[in-house]
Amino acid sequence: MKNIITLVILLVIAPKVMCQTYKIENRHLARILQVTDGRLSTQSIVNKQTKTTLRPISCAEFAIRFSLPDSKDSADCYVSAKDFTVVSVSPYSNPQCPKSKGYRFRLQGKQHGLSLNVCYELAEDDSYCRKHLELTSDRDIRLKRIDVEAIAFEDAHQNYTIKKIAAQGSAQWKPGLGQPLYTTQTGTFWGIEFPAASNTVDNHRMSCGYLWGKTLNASETYTSYNSVIGVCSDPQFIDDAFYSYIDKIRKRPLRLQIQDNSWFDFYKKVSKEKFIHAVEKINNELVVRRGCQPLNAYIIDDGWEDTGKQADWSEKVWTVSSKFWTDATSRLPERL
């Protein structure tokens, strides 16, 4: 289909009601968006491969949690599409993907001095579409969580739960690991193109987003990671469709990586000397003496970072432990 993007404007004239409808589509799928009395929402998503249509039970469209650093009120603020008014709509094309086309909706916040661009895109031959947010504030705010997608469907399903992926150790770490969400009857997958995304389903509502924890300075624009909606031809094989999408966006093909991790030998007690000795020992025994293929990587795991009370946090990231310094001024190992 050469014309991959169409614009349908439907004006419904009723007392104080105006509705405009916009569509991005190709031969695989379509996402129909609407602006009703200034509020942006998804009207429906069409999976053309299964000939099914997803109609939301409810649609917040996106959700942003933040705090005001200069406010005496410590409570977080929550905003979604209902807290904004659409002020303009224009065509959108991702400069990194010239074949993608879509729309940019410019929204103005009703409070907090926020403005937001919501951008949707779809390439001619892709069986998935993308969306991202561009947020600007006229005052400093601290971004805490960004849900690029916040929408509810009857057949929404979270295949991977936090309990199943939580670490079993004393820390009980419960990370976001980017697992996708599915619609079980209509054959779609949902997620964020970010490995630490946290995608959940609660009472049919899908939340595709991630924690950020960053101060957004006044007049600075923050661009979110992309959300993705993909379709398949049979809901029973939605996993296959998701992995096909992953294979298509990989920077390079899937391959076996053979590596050694310092954790299994030294735990947190790894040092520059111990690590160098381990690398030389493994290389001499496996590669030099036995002719095995060299390892792809030697990894310094937990123990490389400075966890002391005097650690330098001026750049807001972990600094390298002094046991890896080569001298009083260097922060890099002499050789690895």
Image (cartoon, rainbow, N blue to C red):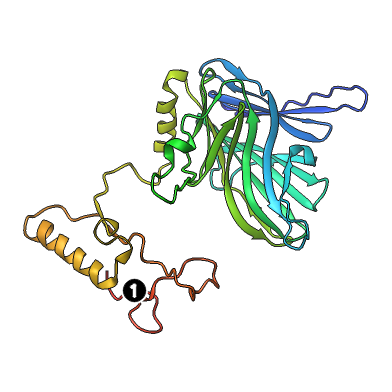
The number of numbered badges drawn on the structure is 1
- What is the quadrant of the N terminus in the image? top right
Q: Position of residue 60 (x, y in %)?
A: 70, 34
Decide which of 86, 205 is in the foreground and name it. 205
Q: Residue at x 44, y 51 (%)?
A: 171
262 in relation to 311, above or below: above
- From this viewpoint, which residue is outermost toward the front? 170
Q: Where is residue 104 in the image (x, y as percent from the top left)?
A: 69, 41
Q: Position of residue 283 (x, y in %)?
A: 15, 61
Q: Which residue is drawn at 69% across and 51% down?
A: 66
Residue 44: which quarter of the image? top right
Decide which of 302, 228 is in the foreground and name it. 302
Give, as a three-letter code, the residue at label 1: Phe
**Would you call the spot at circle 1 few (<14 residues within 10 Å), some (14-19), or many (20 or more)?**
many
Element at label 1: helix
- What is the quadrant of the C terminus in the image? bottom left
- From this viewpoint, which residue is outermost toward the left? 289
In this figure, which residue is indicated by the disc labeled 1?
324
